[in-house]
Image: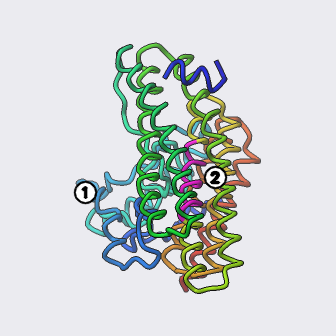
Amino acid sequence: MCTSHSLMARVAQHLRAYRVRVVLVAAIISLNIQAQEEQPDDSTLRSGSASHVQTEPDKEGHCPAVDCDCKAISSVSWQQKCLAAEREIKAICADNDGKPTQYCGLQGPDASPVAILSPRPEVPSITLQTLTQHNRQVVMLLWSVKDDLDNVRYREERAFYGDALQVHKLLDKNIERLYLTQYKAAEGERQRKGDAEAQALWRDYRLELADVLKEFEAYGEMLWGKFNNADTDKGQKAYRLLAMRILRSASQLSEHVASAYAGEGDNKAAALAWQRSARVAQNLVTKEQASEDNPKHLAYYRFQTAARWNRASYYWLESKDEAQAEATAEAAEAAVLAQEEQAQ
Protein backbone atom coordinates (compact mmCIF):
# COMPACT_ATOMS: atom_id res chain seq x y z
CA MET A 1 0.00 0.00 0.00
CA CYS A 2 2.96 2.29 0.46
CA THR A 3 4.66 1.45 -2.86
CA SER A 4 4.53 3.33 -6.14
CA HIS A 5 2.71 0.30 -7.60
CA SER A 6 -0.19 0.82 -5.19
CA LEU A 7 -0.60 4.36 -6.44
CA MET A 8 -0.73 3.18 -9.99
CA ALA A 9 -3.12 0.47 -9.02
CA ARG A 10 -5.48 2.71 -7.17
CA VAL A 11 -4.99 5.53 -9.53
CA ALA A 12 5.09 37.17 22.11
CA GLN A 13 8.49 38.37 20.93
CA HIS A 14 8.63 36.02 18.10
CA LEU A 15 5.13 37.12 17.04
CA ARG A 16 4.90 40.79 18.12
CA ALA A 17 1.31 40.51 17.19
CA TYR A 18 3.21 39.44 14.05
CA ARG A 19 3.32 42.78 12.33
CA VAL A 20 4.19 41.45 8.96
CA ARG A 21 4.67 44.56 6.87
CA VAL A 22 4.00 42.69 3.71
CA VAL A 23 2.45 45.07 1.22
CA LEU A 24 0.42 42.92 -1.11
CA VAL A 25 -0.08 45.80 -3.51
CA ALA A 26 3.58 45.31 -4.34
CA ALA A 27 2.31 42.03 -5.77
CA ILE A 28 5.01 39.81 -4.46
CA ILE A 29 2.56 37.01 -3.81
CA SER A 30 1.94 36.50 -7.51
CA LEU A 31 1.32 32.79 -7.91
CA ASN A 32 2.41 33.03 -11.53
CA ILE A 33 5.94 34.24 -10.85
CA GLN A 34 7.27 30.96 -12.24
CA ALA A 35 5.96 31.86 -15.68
CA GLN A 36 7.08 35.48 -15.70
CA GLU A 37 10.22 36.99 -17.15
CA GLU A 38 13.07 37.57 -14.74
CA GLN A 39 12.39 41.33 -14.70
CA PRO A 40 8.58 41.63 -14.46
CA ASP A 41 7.14 45.10 -14.34
CA ASP A 42 4.87 46.40 -11.60
CA SER A 43 1.68 45.95 -13.60
CA THR A 44 2.41 42.28 -14.20
CA LEU A 45 3.03 41.70 -10.53
CA ARG A 46 -0.05 43.59 -9.41
CA SER A 47 -2.18 41.20 -11.41
CA GLY A 48 -1.31 38.56 -8.84
CA SER A 49 -1.85 40.74 -5.80
CA ALA A 50 -4.55 40.59 -3.15
CA SER A 51 -7.13 42.15 -5.46
CA HIS A 52 -8.68 38.72 -5.86
CA VAL A 53 -9.62 38.73 -2.17
CA GLN A 54 -10.74 42.34 -2.03
CA THR A 55 -13.97 42.79 -0.11
CA GLU A 56 -15.74 45.61 1.63
CA PRO A 57 -15.10 45.87 5.38
CA ASP A 58 -18.07 44.81 7.47
CA LYS A 59 -20.05 47.11 9.74
CA GLU A 60 -17.72 46.46 12.67
CA GLY A 61 -14.75 47.69 10.68
CA HIS A 62 -13.28 44.24 10.18
CA CYS A 63 -12.04 42.72 6.94
CA PRO A 64 -13.64 39.45 5.79
CA ALA A 65 -10.80 38.96 3.31
CA VAL A 66 -8.49 38.20 6.26
CA ASP A 67 -8.95 34.92 8.08
CA CYS A 68 -5.87 33.48 9.77
CA ASP A 69 -7.77 30.30 10.72
CA CYS A 70 -6.81 30.76 14.36
CA LYS A 71 -9.63 28.46 15.46
CA ALA A 72 -7.69 25.51 14.07
CA ILE A 73 -4.87 26.00 16.59
CA SER A 74 -5.35 23.59 19.49
CA SER A 75 -3.20 25.52 21.99
CA VAL A 76 -5.39 28.13 23.69
CA SER A 77 -2.52 30.53 24.40
CA TRP A 78 -1.21 30.37 20.84
CA GLN A 79 -4.72 30.71 19.49
CA GLN A 80 -5.10 33.93 21.45
CA LYS A 81 -1.82 35.24 20.03
CA CYS A 82 -3.04 34.38 16.56
CA LEU A 83 -6.36 36.17 17.12
CA ALA A 84 -4.62 39.27 18.46
CA ALA A 85 -2.42 39.47 15.36
CA GLU A 86 -5.42 38.79 13.13
CA ARG A 87 -7.36 41.67 14.69
CA GLU A 88 -4.52 44.04 13.91
CA ILE A 89 -4.30 42.84 10.30
CA LYS A 90 -8.08 43.17 9.91
CA ALA A 91 -8.08 46.70 11.32
CA ILE A 92 -5.41 47.82 8.88
CA CYS A 93 -7.29 46.08 6.08
CA ALA A 94 -10.52 47.86 7.00
CA ASP A 95 -8.72 51.20 6.96
CA ASN A 96 -7.53 50.31 3.45
CA ASP A 97 -11.07 49.91 2.01
CA GLY A 98 -11.17 46.17 2.61
CA LYS A 99 -7.90 45.41 0.85
CA PRO A 100 -5.46 43.28 2.89
CA THR A 101 -1.97 44.73 3.18
CA GLN A 102 -0.42 42.07 5.42
CA TYR A 103 -0.08 38.32 5.50
CA CYS A 104 -1.18 36.19 8.39
CA GLY A 105 1.69 35.33 10.71
CA LEU A 106 0.78 32.56 13.13
CA GLN A 107 -1.90 30.63 11.28
CA GLY A 108 -4.05 27.59 10.80
CA PRO A 109 -3.86 25.53 7.60
CA ASP A 110 -6.72 27.42 5.91
CA ALA A 111 -5.37 30.91 6.63
CA SER A 112 -5.65 33.71 4.10
CA PRO A 113 -3.81 35.67 2.87
CA VAL A 114 -0.59 33.68 3.06
CA ALA A 115 2.37 33.32 0.71
CA ILE A 116 1.81 29.61 0.23
CA LEU A 117 1.25 28.07 -3.19
CA SER A 118 -0.74 24.97 -2.23
CA PRO A 119 -4.49 25.68 -2.09
CA ARG A 120 -6.91 23.83 0.18
CA PRO A 121 -10.28 24.17 -1.57
CA GLU A 122 -13.47 22.72 -0.18
CA VAL A 123 -14.03 19.30 -1.69
CA PRO A 124 -17.38 17.48 -1.71
CA SER A 125 -17.75 13.75 -1.28
CA ILE A 126 -16.95 11.81 -4.43
CA THR A 127 -18.23 8.59 -5.93
CA LEU A 128 -16.16 5.48 -6.54
CA GLN A 129 -16.27 6.24 -10.25
CA THR A 130 -14.98 9.78 -9.68
CA LEU A 131 -12.22 8.46 -7.42
CA THR A 132 -11.11 6.07 -10.14
CA GLN A 133 -11.03 8.91 -12.65
CA HIS A 134 -9.04 11.15 -10.31
CA ASN A 135 -6.53 8.39 -9.55
CA ARG A 136 -6.07 7.73 -13.24
CA GLN A 137 -5.50 11.43 -13.84
CA VAL A 138 -2.95 11.58 -11.02
CA VAL A 139 -0.96 8.77 -12.62
CA MET A 140 -1.09 10.44 -16.03
CA LEU A 141 -0.13 13.85 -14.67
CA LEU A 142 2.71 12.40 -12.63
CA TRP A 143 4.04 10.79 -15.79
CA SER A 144 3.60 14.09 -17.64
CA VAL A 145 5.60 16.02 -15.04
CA LYS A 146 8.46 13.54 -15.30
CA ASP A 147 8.30 13.58 -19.09
CA ASP A 148 8.20 17.38 -19.19
CA LEU A 149 11.34 17.52 -17.07
CA ASP A 150 13.08 15.12 -19.44
CA ASN A 151 12.03 17.32 -22.36
CA VAL A 152 13.39 20.44 -20.66
CA ARG A 153 16.68 18.66 -20.09
CA TYR A 154 16.80 17.38 -23.68
CA ARG A 155 16.39 20.90 -25.08
CA GLU A 156 18.76 22.48 -22.59
CA GLU A 157 21.51 20.00 -23.41
CA ARG A 158 21.20 20.97 -27.10
CA ALA A 159 21.23 24.69 -26.26
CA PHE A 160 17.58 25.16 -27.31
CA TYR A 161 17.06 27.41 -24.31
CA GLY A 162 13.93 29.18 -25.51
CA ASP A 163 12.26 25.85 -26.25
CA ALA A 164 13.28 24.56 -22.83
CA LEU A 165 11.61 27.53 -21.16
CA GLN A 166 8.42 26.97 -23.16
CA VAL A 167 8.29 23.33 -22.07
CA HIS A 168 8.82 24.45 -18.48
CA LYS A 169 5.67 26.58 -18.65
CA LEU A 170 3.70 23.45 -19.49
CA LEU A 171 5.53 21.57 -16.75
CA ASP A 172 4.49 24.08 -14.10
CA LYS A 173 0.86 23.90 -15.18
CA ASN A 174 0.99 20.12 -14.91
CA ILE A 175 2.48 20.37 -11.39
CA GLU A 176 -0.47 22.53 -10.33
CA ARG A 177 -3.00 20.21 -11.98
CA LEU A 178 -1.34 17.18 -10.38
CA TYR A 179 -1.66 18.57 -6.87
CA LEU A 180 -5.24 19.78 -7.29
CA THR A 181 -6.33 16.44 -8.78
CA GLN A 182 -4.68 14.54 -5.94
CA TYR A 183 -6.26 16.88 -3.40
CA LYS A 184 -9.73 16.32 -4.86
CA ALA A 185 -9.20 12.56 -4.89
CA ALA A 186 -7.87 12.22 -1.34
CA GLU A 187 -10.08 14.77 0.38
CA GLY A 188 -13.13 13.66 -1.57
CA GLU A 189 -12.44 10.13 -0.42
CA ARG A 190 -12.11 11.42 3.14
CA GLN A 191 -15.69 12.69 2.82
CA ARG A 192 -16.89 9.42 1.28
CA LYS A 193 -15.07 6.76 3.31
CA GLY A 194 -13.10 8.39 6.13
CA ASP A 195 -9.61 9.34 7.26
CA ALA A 196 -7.90 5.99 6.72
CA GLU A 197 -8.69 5.87 3.01
CA ALA A 198 -7.66 9.49 2.49
CA GLN A 199 -4.43 9.00 4.41
CA ALA A 200 -3.52 6.01 2.26
CA LEU A 201 -4.02 8.06 -0.91
CA TRP A 202 -1.83 10.86 0.43
CA ARG A 203 0.86 8.41 1.51
CA ASP A 204 1.08 6.79 -1.92
CA TYR A 205 1.21 10.19 -3.59
CA ARG A 206 3.89 11.49 -1.23
CA LEU A 207 6.12 8.47 -1.82
CA GLU A 208 5.92 9.00 -5.57
CA LEU A 209 6.46 12.73 -5.29
CA ALA A 210 9.52 12.51 -3.02
CA ASP A 211 11.63 11.02 -5.82
CA VAL A 212 10.35 13.59 -8.31
CA LEU A 213 11.30 16.42 -5.93
CA LYS A 214 14.84 15.08 -5.58
CA GLU A 215 15.19 14.95 -9.36
CA PHE A 216 14.06 18.56 -9.74
CA GLU A 217 16.41 19.76 -7.01
CA ALA A 218 19.38 17.89 -8.46
CA TYR A 219 18.75 19.20 -11.97
CA GLY A 220 18.23 22.76 -10.73
CA GLU A 221 21.52 22.68 -8.84
CA MET A 222 23.28 21.24 -11.89
CA LEU A 223 21.95 24.12 -14.01
CA TRP A 224 23.14 26.56 -11.35
CA GLY A 225 26.59 25.05 -11.64
CA LYS A 226 26.48 25.56 -15.41
CA PHE A 227 25.48 29.18 -14.80
CA ASN A 228 28.52 29.71 -12.58
CA ASN A 229 30.83 28.09 -15.14
CA ALA A 230 29.37 29.65 -18.30
CA ASP A 231 31.91 31.71 -20.24
CA THR A 232 29.45 33.77 -22.31
CA ASP A 233 26.79 36.28 -21.35
CA LYS A 234 24.20 34.31 -23.31
CA GLY A 235 25.08 31.09 -21.54
CA GLN A 236 25.03 32.71 -18.12
CA LYS A 237 21.64 34.30 -18.70
CA ALA A 238 20.10 31.11 -20.08
CA TYR A 239 21.42 28.81 -17.36
CA ARG A 240 20.48 31.18 -14.55
CA LEU A 241 16.96 31.55 -15.86
CA LEU A 242 16.49 27.80 -16.33
CA ALA A 243 18.04 27.03 -12.94
CA MET A 244 15.74 29.42 -11.10
CA ARG A 245 12.67 28.14 -12.94
CA ILE A 246 13.44 24.52 -12.14
CA LEU A 247 14.26 25.33 -8.52
CA ARG A 248 10.99 27.26 -8.19
CA SER A 249 9.19 24.15 -9.41
CA ALA A 250 11.11 22.14 -6.80
CA SER A 251 10.03 24.71 -4.22
CA GLN A 252 6.38 24.21 -5.16
CA LEU A 253 6.76 20.43 -5.05
CA SER A 254 8.29 20.68 -1.58
CA GLU A 255 5.04 22.30 -0.40
CA HIS A 256 3.08 19.45 -1.94
CA VAL A 257 5.16 16.88 -0.06
CA ALA A 258 4.55 18.75 3.19
CA SER A 259 0.83 18.95 2.43
CA ALA A 260 0.78 15.21 1.77
CA TYR A 261 2.24 14.48 5.21
CA ALA A 262 -0.49 16.65 6.69
CA GLY A 263 -3.06 14.73 4.68
CA GLU A 264 -1.68 11.53 6.18
CA GLY A 265 -2.34 12.94 9.64
CA ASP A 266 1.36 12.86 10.62
CA ASN A 267 1.79 16.24 12.31
CA LYS A 268 5.47 15.84 13.23
CA ALA A 269 6.43 14.73 9.72
CA ALA A 270 4.37 17.60 8.30
CA ALA A 271 6.19 20.08 10.53
CA LEU A 272 9.58 18.75 9.44
CA ALA A 273 8.53 18.81 5.79
CA TRP A 274 7.35 22.41 6.04
CA GLN A 275 10.70 23.30 7.63
CA ARG A 276 12.46 21.65 4.70
CA SER A 277 10.22 23.57 2.31
CA ALA A 278 11.15 26.82 4.06
CA ARG A 279 14.83 26.03 3.50
CA VAL A 280 14.12 25.36 -0.18
CA ALA A 281 12.64 28.87 -0.44
CA GLN A 282 15.61 30.28 1.46
CA ASN A 283 17.88 28.66 -1.13
CA LEU A 284 16.11 30.76 -3.76
CA VAL A 285 16.77 33.87 -1.66
CA THR A 286 20.48 33.02 -1.55
CA LYS A 287 20.71 32.40 -5.28
CA GLU A 288 18.78 35.54 -6.14
CA GLN A 289 21.09 37.60 -3.95
CA ALA A 290 24.12 36.03 -5.63
CA SER A 291 22.94 36.86 -9.14
CA GLU A 292 20.28 39.33 -10.29
CA ASP A 293 19.40 40.55 -6.78
CA ASN A 294 15.91 41.55 -7.98
CA PRO A 295 14.15 43.27 -5.02
CA LYS A 296 10.67 41.99 -5.92
CA HIS A 297 11.86 38.42 -6.33
CA LEU A 298 13.79 38.60 -3.07
CA ALA A 299 10.69 39.83 -1.27
CA TYR A 300 8.61 37.05 -2.79
CA TYR A 301 11.05 34.34 -1.73
CA ARG A 302 11.49 35.75 1.77
CA PHE A 303 7.77 35.94 2.48
CA GLN A 304 7.38 32.45 1.08
CA THR A 305 10.11 31.31 3.47
CA ALA A 306 8.34 32.98 6.41
CA ALA A 307 4.97 31.48 5.50
CA ARG A 308 6.42 27.98 5.45
CA TRP A 309 8.16 28.44 8.80
CA ASN A 310 4.82 29.60 10.22
CA ARG A 311 3.05 26.58 8.76
CA ALA A 312 5.66 24.38 10.41
CA SER A 313 4.84 26.13 13.71
CA TYR A 314 1.21 25.12 13.37
CA TYR A 315 2.08 21.46 12.93
CA TRP A 316 4.57 21.54 15.80
CA LEU A 317 1.79 22.87 17.99
CA GLU A 318 -0.45 20.03 16.81
CA SER A 319 2.40 17.68 17.81
CA LYS A 320 2.42 19.26 21.30
CA ASP A 321 5.98 20.52 20.84
CA GLU A 322 5.89 24.19 21.84
CA ALA A 323 9.67 24.53 21.87
CA GLN A 324 9.85 23.66 18.19
CA ALA A 325 6.86 25.89 17.50
CA GLU A 326 8.68 28.78 19.16
CA ALA A 327 11.83 28.13 17.12
CA THR A 328 10.03 28.00 13.79
CA ALA A 329 7.95 31.10 14.57
CA GLU A 330 11.19 32.94 15.31
CA ALA A 331 12.65 31.72 12.02
CA ALA A 332 9.58 33.11 10.25
CA GLU A 333 10.03 36.48 11.89
CA ALA A 334 13.71 36.52 10.97
CA ALA A 335 12.81 36.08 7.31
CA VAL A 336 10.34 38.98 7.47
CA LEU A 337 12.77 41.23 9.34
CA ALA A 338 15.43 40.52 6.71
CA GLN A 339 13.02 41.77 4.08
CA GLU A 340 12.12 44.87 6.09
CA GLU A 341 15.81 45.72 6.44
CA GLN A 342 16.28 45.23 2.71
CA ALA A 343 13.36 47.53 1.94
CA GLN A 344 14.67 50.36 4.10
Mark 1 neighbour class, 10 Å CA radius: few under 14, some 14 to 19, many 20 or more: some
Rendered view: 140 above or below 190: below
User: Which residue was labeled with disc 1?
Assistant: 55
The answer to which quarter of the image holds residue 306 is: bottom right
Region in magenta: 245-256
What's the residue at 50%, 68% (across, down)?
A: 160
250 vs 170, nearest the viewer: 170
Indicate the position of residue 284 as horizontal and vertical percent values.
62, 67
**In what element is the residue under mark 2?**
helix
Residue at the (76%, 47%) spot, across then down? 323
Q: How is the image coloured?
A: rainbow
Is residue 40 on the magenta stretch? no
Q: Would you say the magenta stretch is mainly helix, strand or loop?
A: helix
**Which amino acid type is marked by label 1?**
Thr
Which quadrant is the N terminus positioned in? top right
**Depicted 25 relative to depicted 250: above or below:** below
The one of 152 and 106 positioned closer to us in this rendering = 152
Residue drawn where x is 65% and y is 57% of the image:
219
- Residue holding disc 2: 277
Identify the amino acid type marked 2.
Ser
For this rendering, which residue is in front, 338 or 149?
149
**Residue 29 is at least partly visible in this image:** no
Which secondary structure lies at badge 1? loop
Alpha-carbon span between mark 2 and mark 1: 31 Å
